Image (tube, rainbow, N blue to C red):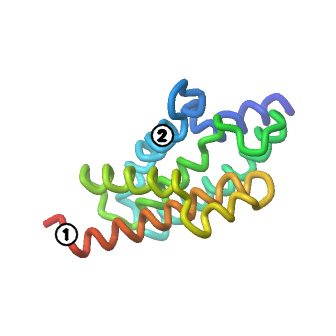
Amino acid sequence: MARAKTILATVVATGLGAGYAPFAPGTAGSLVGLALFWPLHHLALWAQAGATAVVFILGVVAATHVARRLGIEDPGLVVADEVVGMWVSLLGVPLTGVTAVAGFVLFRVFDVFKPYPARDLERLPAGWGIMCDDVMAGVYANLLLRAGLLAFPLS
């Protein structure tokens, strides 16, 4: 049972293995997040938000487990935070090739630079700190993407 829990936590925490990418695992995790969100974009906002909340909680639990097992506060191979952050970036946004690329780029920029309060959220304990800063980066990306869509409508 403990081995199964570790395997499941590792699969979730590494974004289906994206966290093992030899170069830029966070970017790889964000790409997995984009791919996994694509089928959800047709759902109502409440369903998108609900799915995002479930994956967020699973990510907190999985990230906590993997970080403790490795003895590292925020292991680079944990990219569930990028998956969820990417989902938050795209919540309720009409998903097209343009918005997907824009959402991806905006999320990566905010994830790297971590404007206030994202950096402070990293100090939360265990998986909460791993996950919450990327959720905040996703919120910023979502808001800027929405502002861009207001200024430059797709149609």
Considering depth in this image, is 146 or 38 the residue closer to the camera? 146
Residue 71: x percent and y percent? 84, 37
Considering depth in this image, is 33 or 108 the residue closer to the camera? 108
Numbered circles on residues, count:
2
Residue at x-position 26% and y-position 69%: 149
Task: Choose top left, top right, bottom left or bottom right for residue 90.
Answer: bottom left
Specify the label residue 75 is tagged with: none
**SS class, disc 1:** loop
Left or right: residue 75 versus residue 81 is: right
**SS class, disc 2:** helix
The residue pinned by badge 1 equals 152
Placement of 77 over or under 149, stated as above or below? above
User: In which quadrant of the rendered image does the C terminus lie?
Assistant: bottom left
Q: Residues within 10 Å of mark 2 (few under 14, many from 20)?
A: many
Residue at x-position 42% and y-position 54%: 40
Report the amino acid beneath label 1.
Answer: Phe
Task: Choose top left, top right, bottom left or bottom right for residue 5.
Answer: top right
Report the amino acid beneath label 2.
Answer: Thr
Residue at x-position 68% and y-position 56%: 57
Q: Which comes sooner in the sequence, label 2 or label 1?
A: 2
Placement of 82 over or under 116, stated as above or below? above
Residue 100: x percent and y percent? 32, 52
Left or right: residue 98 versus residue 83 is: left
The residue pinned by badge 2 equals 27
